[in-house]
Image (cartoon, helix red, strand yellow):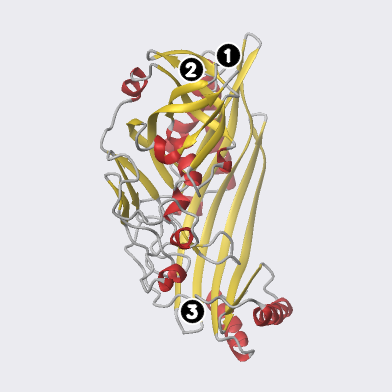
Amino acid sequence: MSSLSELAEKIISKLDMRGADEVEFYGLKRKLIQASISDSKIIQITEKSINSYGVRIAIGKRISSYSSEDLSPTSIDKMIDRMIRIAKVSREDKHWKGFARGYSMGPETEVFDEKIVKISHEELVELISSAIELSISSAKKAGASEASVTGGNINTTIDEIMIANSHGEEISGKVTAFNLYYYVKSSKNGKESTYNAIITQRNLDEKKIMEEAERAGERSVKFMNVKSIKSGKYQILFMPKIMGSIIGVALAPAFSALNIQQNRSPLKGKLGKEVLSPQITIVDDPYIPWGYGSRNFDDEGIATTKKRTVTDGILKSILYDYYTASRENKSSTGNGVRRSLAANPQPTFINLIVETKDKLSMDELISNIKRGIIVYDTIGQWMSNPVNGGVQATITHGLYIENGEIKHAVKGAVLGGNIYKMLKENYVGASKTKENIENIYSPAILTSEVDVAGE
């Protein structure tokens, strides 16, 4: 296969000859190792290379896009024909001012791990087998009579990315990633409960893997004594990963300039105003070493930047890609991110970091709970509404607390509320430590007066 640079040059040249006014190319070479877990064993491990590309073109103010893993000349010629036809009949975008220009890089950060490059299948199997054994032993140590890892997946990726345009600009970089997800099931006296181990990071950190494996085993025993609770208002202590997951759905999209311009964000018109608790600061930091979203240029080739979007509760800035910035005659903040190779970039966080002034221990947070629930995991939080900040989720792993004392496990209760109210007037405190779920880093956060529908 030709290099990404040669492929880009070929495609851009052909589209230019066919009448495209502008062309943008995004190429991806990926080496992927995948492993599947079942019954506490790795049952399959595969390795493959995927070469793919995405192209966007503009004819006047008419845009079309396309992506493919087929790099054959015939496929490329068909792609070019299709893109030209689509662009000519597409509706004009009155706000269109061209594809991103001025490619550049921000400061270097650690995103490429040689351990991931060099690890063999046998070494990966040995590492994950050790993690599985640790999860099982920690579950039994915590009181389970039987424990197993029922299923899951692990993958490592090595990505080479290249962006080019018809103005002669080109930029490239390499990143790695490690993802682990598996369920630990424990049983005792005829009762069962589960918990999941999750790791999403750019490097292969054996210590972190083992810490997560041990914690998943310990927690898999916590949720056997399930009892229902009555409907009402409760204090809720969101553990870091589930807090991050909810923030990612209900809060993060509101900082997008596109959503603000399209009246789909409650932050519209709020710059300089208090939107969260004065205890909370939110930072977009693309340069966290091994951060899951870390990078020094975005998906449009623009240098990423570290910025505070919220400082002490006050909205200080929003996130722009090239398109949304040009609509307001501003510069991109380096936050253009593609959801797929053919998708238009949209402004979003590179790494969202929740910082808090109060940094409490978990014991201190729990001691503040008079009547509440520690929520470790939920389902349905992805249905939360970023347009108004509405949150709704069903608790799958929770512990009911009275006067700082754990009483029993909770499952099936539905919590609801508004993310801004939770993180402003009802905010109580946050933990010292953070955890990440993909590119969102959050502490545990305690909030009050949350509606819970129980029995």
Can you say whether 32 is above or below 136 in the image?
Answer: below
Q: In the rendered view, does 85 fall on the left or right side of 111?
A: right
Q: CA distance from mark 1 to mark 2?
A: 9 Å
Q: Nearer the viewer, residue 367 or 351?
A: 367
Q: Amino acid at mark 1?
A: Lys
Q: Which residue is mark 2?
A: 400
Can you say whether 227 is above or below 375 in the image?
Answer: above
Q: Within the image, what quadrant is residue 238 found in? A: top left
Q: Earlier in the sequence, mark 1 or mark 2?
A: 1
Q: Earlier in the sequence, mark 3 or mark 2?
A: 3
Percent across and percent down for residue 376 are 49, 28
Could you tell me if the residues under marks 1 and 2 are in contact, i.e. CB atoms within 8 Å? yes
Percent across and percent down for residue 203 are 44, 48
Q: Earlier in the sequence, mark 3 or mark 1?
A: 3
Q: Nearer the viewer, residue 109 or 355?
A: 355
Can the viewer see residue 359? yes
Disc 2 crowd, CA 10 A, few/some/many (<14, 14-19, 20+): many
Q: Amino acid at mark 3?
A: Gly
Q: Which residue is mark 3?
A: 98
Q: In the rendered view, does 29 fall on the left or right side of 281?
A: right
Q: CA distance from mark 3 to mark 1?
A: 58 Å
Q: Which residue is mark 1?
A: 227
Secondary structure under tag 3 reads loop
- Where's the C terminus, which quadrant? top right
Percent across and percent down for residue 80 are 67, 81
Can you say whether 57 is above or below 194 in the image?
Answer: below
